[in-house]
Amino acid sequence: MNTINIYKFFIPFFLTSIMLSCEQDIEFTTISLINLPEVSETFRIDEGCYEEVFVLDSFLIMMARCDDYKIHVYDKNNLKFITKFGTAGQGPCDFNVAKPLQNSSSSLNSNNIILFDTRLFQLKTVNLNKLLSNENIANCVFSAPVDRDLRYMREINKLGESKFAAVGMSNYGKEGLFVIMDTLTKENQWIEFLPKKRMPDRYKRLVYYGFLGANSDKNSIIYASRYFDQILFYDMKGQLKNRHVFSKLKMPELSKQYSGPVFESIYYSVYMYASPNYCFVFRLNQNPPPEGEDEHVYRHPTQLLVYNWDGVLVKAFEIPVSLSSFNFLCYDDEFGYLYLSDRSTEENDMYETVRKIKIGDYLRTN
């Protein structure tokens, strides 16, 4: 082996060793938990079967999975029903599998609901003011085909007129944690995997699975990993600006039956909601430890971590067991209320229980 070939062999090995040693030296973020405040109000909603929810101006918008109308609108203060719309179909005013297009900046949340219909591959913008003024729905919905590059993405966040951040699905997921793309210029910037772990490409999409949020007003993007105990903040150019690691970033065991971690793998972040001022990450109680190992290493209280968009951990709440099985979570910046919902388990009486919890006073930093 000549000198050049020796260098070709040892330089990648040397760089990988440095990279892995740096990962081992990461300083852990400490968490000081306080109890979640008591529930302020409880509401029963008989429609039930919701899978997405968000606050928009004075409304609580709930996306129904098993109702003829896909979008339900409630008053966020008293949870009184206002209207529902969006029947399934193939027309420009129809909705099938509609997911809200995300961005927590206040400038993009001006009473327009922007939805991505993943079955019709269309972006639909609903002018809620017009709709509530008894306008014909045909005058309130604008439909446009979604760019081909976005069709097989998830966690899609709109950063600007033609700029998006999204998480890859299928083969796209082996490129990086997420992508910042411009559908006009066709420029794609994949954000490198963190932590850097060796594995066959086919495993990467699920091993690095995570939740993405963005706020273009704050020049910030958050990525919360499911299988690695970390939360990452980037700027709009994809530069890492803050990283919170809570425990050793261990590689999950890979399944031999499918291209992902085994089902018994420990979960960390399992839910995220982003508001104009804060990011909320639900950190699940970990799985029971393997037989003979210390339980305290594998378990922690179920947590709700609250960050500002600078990536600063503002507050960490311990979630009581009675509230830890919620279906969705969202937050109202205006009045400081957290909304938690869980679905009934009674086969013949399906409904949602929505709880309002006042936490705004705990998040003030001045």
Image (spheres, grey):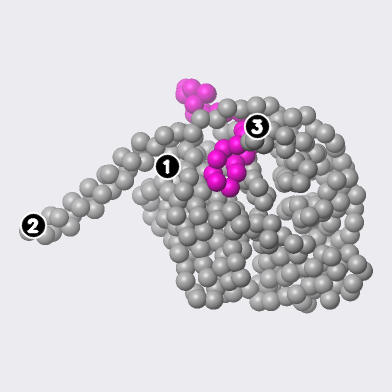
Q: How many marks?
A: 3
Magenta span includes 296: yes
The residue lying toward the viewer, choosing from 274 and 310, is 310
Amino acid of disc 2: Thr
User: Gap in Å between the C-alphas at discs 2 and 1?
Assistant: 35 Å
The answer to whether residue 42 is seen in the rendering is: yes
From this viewpoint, which residue is outermost toward the left? 2
Camera-near label (3 vs 1) is 3
How far from the left and from the top, in percent, is residue 128? 82, 64
Q: Residues within 10 Å of mark 3 (few under 14, many from 20)?
A: many
Q: Residue at x 60, y 66 (%)?
A: 160
How far from the left and from the top, in percent, is residue 1? 8, 57
Among the two numbered marks 3 and 1 on one chain, the one whose residue lies closer to the N terminus:
1
Q: Is residue 244 above or below residue 219?
A: above
What residue is pinned by disc 1? 251
Element at label 1? loop
The residue lying toward the viewer, choosing from 355 and 352, is 355
Q: Residue at x 76, y 52 (%)?
A: 55
Q: Which residues are magenta?
A: 289-316
Numbered mark located on residue 3 in the image:
2
Magenta span includes 75: no
What residue is pinned by disc 3? 317
How far from the left and from the top, in percent, is residue 366? 64, 35
How far from the left and from the top, in percent, is residue 181? 51, 67
User: Gap in Å between the C-alphas at discs 2 and 3?
Assistant: 58 Å
Q: Residue at x 84, y 56 (%)?
A: 73
Camera-near label (2 vs 1) is 2
Amino acid of disc 1: Met
